[in-house]
Amino acid sequence: MLKKEAGSAELPQHIAFIMDGNGRWARKRGLPRTAGHREGARTLRRIIRDLDSMGIKFATFYAFSTENWKRSDEEVSTLMRLFEENLDDLVNYENENIRLRFIGGRERLSDTLRKKMLDAEEKSKSHTGMTVILAINYGGRDDIVRAAKRSAELISEGSLRPDDLTEERFESFLQTDGVPPVDLMVRTGGEIRISNFLIWQISYAELYFTDTLWCDFSKKDLEAAVNEFMSRSRRYGDAR
Ligand code: IPE
Ligand code: IPE
Ligand code: MG
């Protein structure tokens, strides 16, 4: 249950998830890693519903990092196939009014997946409910380099003066443009690291790490993370 006591802090507006531990979940059961990813996709759909019912407005999920190409061809192609299959399901959330967005470089993705991503964004763009952002072939450093290139282009064209490149302006070149900064970042699977996720966007996020594997992550675990978030004091450098 969410502890919404009078006077307690607000719900996080934006939660980012590092969905880690699928491989270990499968290994514990003597299954191939890909079976863990299949179960992880079910967890993702379940957690999206839970977030929506809790009233969370933005959720970003780390589905595939720029480093995950190092995995076997079999694992990478299963993951790509799962993204395609799940997009169909997620788009069918139409009644639930969920808006889908994607971050990450699309150049290395298949034509089929790219098309499904565009379709999903197109079909859900007028939805006014929760925004779900899937990070596929995403890297925080890559995001920043792309934004730096964009700034350099505008400067060399003469449409941006170096002095006008403020934090806000630079942020608008990141792939999360228009999305509020991350309030709470949750990592499942026991590792205490960021693994090149939203490195700019989490600069003032509250971090929450749990040993629970992503496949086992439940509504109760989600509520525990949100309750912990609401119990923390966010000072933003102030002396309050
Ligand atoms: C996270 O689970 C999913 C992706 C990175 C795509 P892992 O596949 O990293 O699972 P573990 O960490 O090996 O258990
Ligand atoms: C982070 O998990 C990436 C995703 C969840 C998509 P990894 O399993 O790839 O991270 P490391 O290798 O443990 O840092
Ligand atoms: Mg992992």
Image: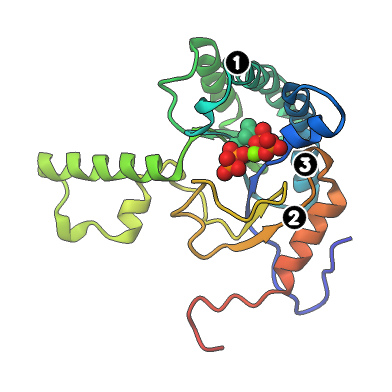
Left or right of residue 48, residue 162 in this image: left
Report helix, strand or loop for mark 2. loop
Q: Residue at x 71, y 51 (%)?
A: 190
For disc 1, the neighbor class at 10 Å (few under 14, some 14 to 19, many from 20) is: some
Q: In this view, does 34 lie above or below 13?
A: above
Q: Residue furthest bottom?
A: 239
Find disc 3 in the rendering and name its residue. Answer: 47
* On-image quarter of the N terminus: bottom right
**Displayed quadrant of residue 92:** top right
**Displayed quadrant of residue 128:** top right
Q: What is the three-letter code of the residue carrying label 3?
A: Ile
Find disc 1 in the rendering and name its residue. Answer: 77
Q: Residue at x 25, y 40 (%)?
A: 149
Left or right of residue 7, residue 135 in this image: left
Q: What is the three-letter code of the residue carrying label 2?
A: Thr
Q: Which of marks 1 and 2 is nearer the N terminus?
A: 1
Q: Is residue 84 above or below residue 240?
A: above
Taking the image in four quarters, ligand 2 sits in the one at top right
Q: Earlier in the sequence, mark 3 or mark 1?
A: 3
**Displayed quadrant of residue 164:** bottom left
Report, in whole angstroms, how far the alpha carbon at label 3 lies from the one at label 1.
Answer: 24 Å
Report helix, strand or loop for mark 1. helix
Find disc 2 in the rendering and name its residue. Answer: 210
Report helix, strand or loop for mark 3. helix
Mark 1 CB within 8 Å of ligand 1 = no
Q: What is the three-letter code of the residue carrying label 1?
A: Ser
Viewer-side label of 3, 1: 1
Residue 11, numbered label: none
Can you give x and y, in whole percent of width and height, for residue 146 in the image? 32, 39
Left or right of residue 2, residue 232 in this image: left
Mark 3 CB within 8 Å of ligand 2 = no
Report, in whole angstroms, how far the alpha carbon at label 1 lies from the one at label 2.
Answer: 28 Å
